[in-house]
Image (spheres, rainbow, N blue to C red):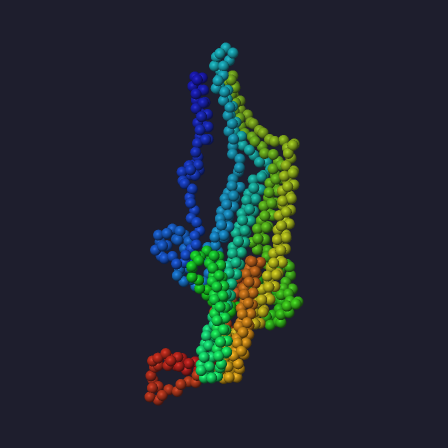
Amino acid sequence: MVNKQRITLLLMTLLVVGGCRGPHGLDKLIFAEQPAVLPSAPLVSLQASAADTAKDGVVRLAASPAVPDLNAVALSLDEAISLGLSRNPDLAAVRASEPVAIAAIGVANTYIYNPQFQTQVLPYNRDRNGADGAVSQQHVVVQTIELGGQQRHREGMAAANWRQVHSTVNQAELMNMAQTTRLYFAALYQRELRDLSSSLASMNEQLIGVIERREKAGQSNKADLELTKLQYRASLRQLRLTEAGYQTALAALRTQLNFAANAPLDLTGKWAGWRWRPMEDAAGLPQSATDTDVIAFDAYTASTSIDDSVLRQLVVNRPDVVAARSAVAMAAENMRLADAMRCPNLQAGPMYQRDEASGVFWGVQAQIDIPVVNTGKPLVQQRMAELRLQQVTATQLENRAILEARAAIQRYERARRLVAQSRDEFNRDLSKALKPFEDQFKAGQITLLQVFAARTTLIQSQQSFFDLLNELTLATADVTQATGLPPQMLIIMMESLPKPESETQPELPPPVKAKANSSDEKPTDANSEATSREELLQP
């Protein structure tokens, strides 16, 4: 009988040990499946066909539903920002950290201590006479109990950590939005310079034909023709240079949007006709000046009337500021956790014991540390110092955010007013502005050098206006980065410049008198149909 009890106890012990060491369900799941190879983030070619998309999983993964036509992409600012937020590889890597923080919340919400089972079995027992005695055994179940309430502080730390990571992701998205705006407008700026150089080269080419005809007629000399050809060659070199700058800007935009190097992009819109809202309209700031006020560069400050409290309300929801406040909350919970850990944990549970004399005992076993050597106070002091560090960091970050917002608003308002004051001066096409000079040259009233001087002046003026627009777009990106306002709240996109009131109703030709014998006939061609519409528009 005694041998059977010994054998049974030994088998139970082996089963317990074997069950603890055997593979659990999670281990089976981990070791049964091979590690999944994540697909790399390839450059998405916009020229992928529908057949490639159907048979290639990577192409299906990378295909964007926002781009219906993969052969020629007409890209607006809103579409560029949306594609940058969905395709940028750096942003995708940052977003991958948020599921880790969410999983950490689940870990913190789980109590970290499991019940412990302790057993002691002495199956071999003989008395002094050599007779087998009863099996001595002891079984204890112990549970660790946190008397200081550390669990709620761990949960608070995990929640604060998730808020910090989430705000960091939002900050990365904001930076991506600002960078996409910069690159998009940089490409528009280079395109305008390219078009300006193309117009100049075309006009110089036309002027060569005019000079050649005047030379044959004896009205110009050989020097004028050579000077015109020299200007034409210089304009061609400038055109190639601006084309290279435009392609470089497009390449930077493709990299930002994670497009292939050969992806064709067509930037939509004419930014010269777009309008920019004042900051008081976009963010509710007090108005400090009007667009017609004269800019004094020596003593101009666009936001002298903006109080720090207004700017503080503007930047209070900036993602990096929110992340800094979350770091302060996490440091505070960490300090509270260290203070709660000064109260030692209690290990207690029921106990069963049977001695060699077959005596049975039931009782309770408890264990607790005595905080004599390590009281936990040094750790609390360290956590308090870390909390002060995070508080100082958050305060200084908020102060720096206010300064950045003030500087960005100043730059934006200064550039916006300069563009508003200079817009009417550059509301004419370059060829139309140069036509009076060319007509006077053809009439022999001015020389060729005067024509070139007028062209140089007009081109420099036009380029200076583009420089002002480029400065305004860079300031717009700075405002987005400094305040968190999206560019769509600052820009009013218009297809063309609004014409003056005198040009909104162009003069129409006088109505055509109808013939007596054809009063009932309908127009049959496009010109007659247009004439009929003009007749209907007459007052």
Query: From the image, which quarter does the N terminus lie in?
Result: top left
Quadrant assignment, res 149: top right
Q: Residue at position x 37%, y 52% from top? A: 56
Q: Residue at position x 56%, y 72% from top? A: 422
Q: Residue furthest toward the bottom?
A: 516
Quadrant assignment, res 413: bottom right
Query: From the image, which quarter does the C terminus lie in?
Result: bottom left
Q: Residue furthest toward the right?
A: 299
Asked whether residue 246 is in view, the answer is no
| Residue 207 place in picture, x, y as percent | 47, 77
The answer to whether 105 appears left or right of 394 in the picture is: left
| Number of disc labels | 0
Q: Residue at position x 62%, y 65% from top? A: 302
Residue 255, placed above or below residue 502: above
Q: Residue furthest toward the front?
A: 222
| Residue 451 place in picture, x, y as percent | 52, 78
Could you say which is closer to the camera, residue 423 or residue 249? 249
Residue 288, placed above or below residue 448: above
Quadrant assignment, res 278: bottom right
The answer to whether 49 appears left or right of 288 in the picture is: left
Asked whether residue 34 is in view, the answer is yes
Q: Residue at position x 57%, y 53% from top? A: 320
Residue 488, placed above or below residue 527: above
| Residue 213 place in picture, x, y as percent | 44, 81
| Residue 523 place in picture, x, y as percent | 35, 81
Could you say which is closer to the camera, residue 241 or residue 142? 241
